[in-house]
Image (spheres, helix red, strand yellow):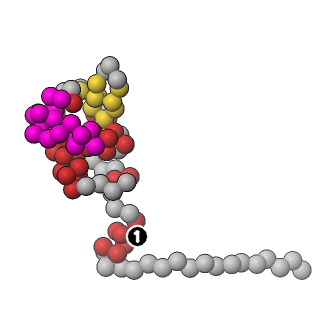
């Protein structure tokens, strides 16, 4: 699923707010209607961004409980699952890679 620039921007704002901003000392985010109003966005935009954050493990959403901030995930400095693809890292370092398929055979005497 392609992520829009708006979704990514809202996601980044929410991450910052949870780590260092308004929600840095909170266990939960406000209700969607309140949060959307605070951010000046539609609830649809907010839900799309919250869905991204939930898939990435930063939050958990439960009906009747709300949106819980997963501090144990949020505080991790480097997450390999959110970083660059390995081959992109190689290319970014000015190197190239290739695949080589080999076959071995064992002859019995």
In the picture, residue 14 is in which quadrant?
top left
Q: Residue at x 39, y 80 (%)?
A: 96
- Taking depth in this image into account, of 2 and 67 the one nearest to the observer is 2
Q: Residue at x 21, y 36 (%)?
A: 43
The residue carrying pointer 1 sits among few (fewer than 14), some (14 to 19) or many (20 or more) residues within 10 Å by Cα, namely: few
Q: Secondary structure at mark 1?
A: helix
Vertical relation: 12 (above or below) 24: below
**Total of numbered circles in the picture?**
1
Residue interval drawn in magenta: 33-48
Vertical relation: 73 (above or below) 30: below
In the picture, residue 72 is in which quadrant?
top left
Q: Find the residue positioned furthest to the top.
A: 64
Q: Which residue is mark 1?
A: 87
Task: List x then y, in percent, for residue 8.
Answer: 23, 51
Task: List x then y, in percent, for residue 92.
Answer: 30, 73
Q: Residue at x 21, y 30 (%)?
A: 32
Task: List x then y, in percent, for residue 44.
Answer: 24, 40
- Taking depth in this image into account, of 103 and 57 the one nearest to the observer is 57
Find out whether residue 43 is within the magenta segment: yes
- Taking depth in this image into account, of 26 and 94 the one nearest to the observer is 26
Q: Can residue 26 be spotted in the picture?
A: no
Vertical relation: 98 (above or below) 36: below
Q: Residue at x 31, y 21 (%)?
A: 65
Give the overall secondary structure of the magenta segment. helix
């Amino acid at each position: 699923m392609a992520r829009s620039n708006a979704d990514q921007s809202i996601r980044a704002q929410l991450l910052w707010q949870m780590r260092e901003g308004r929600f840095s000392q909170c266990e939960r985010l406000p209700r969607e209607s309140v949060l959307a109003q605070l951010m000046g966005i539609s609830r649809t935009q907010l839900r799309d961004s919250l869905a991204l954050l939930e898939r990435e493990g930063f939050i958990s959403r439960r009906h009747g409980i709300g949106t819980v901030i997963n501090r144990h995930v949020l505080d991790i400095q480097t997450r390999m699952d959110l970083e660059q693809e390995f081959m992109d890292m190689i290319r970014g370092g000015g190197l190239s890679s290739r695949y080589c398929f080999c076959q071995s055979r064992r002859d019995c005497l």
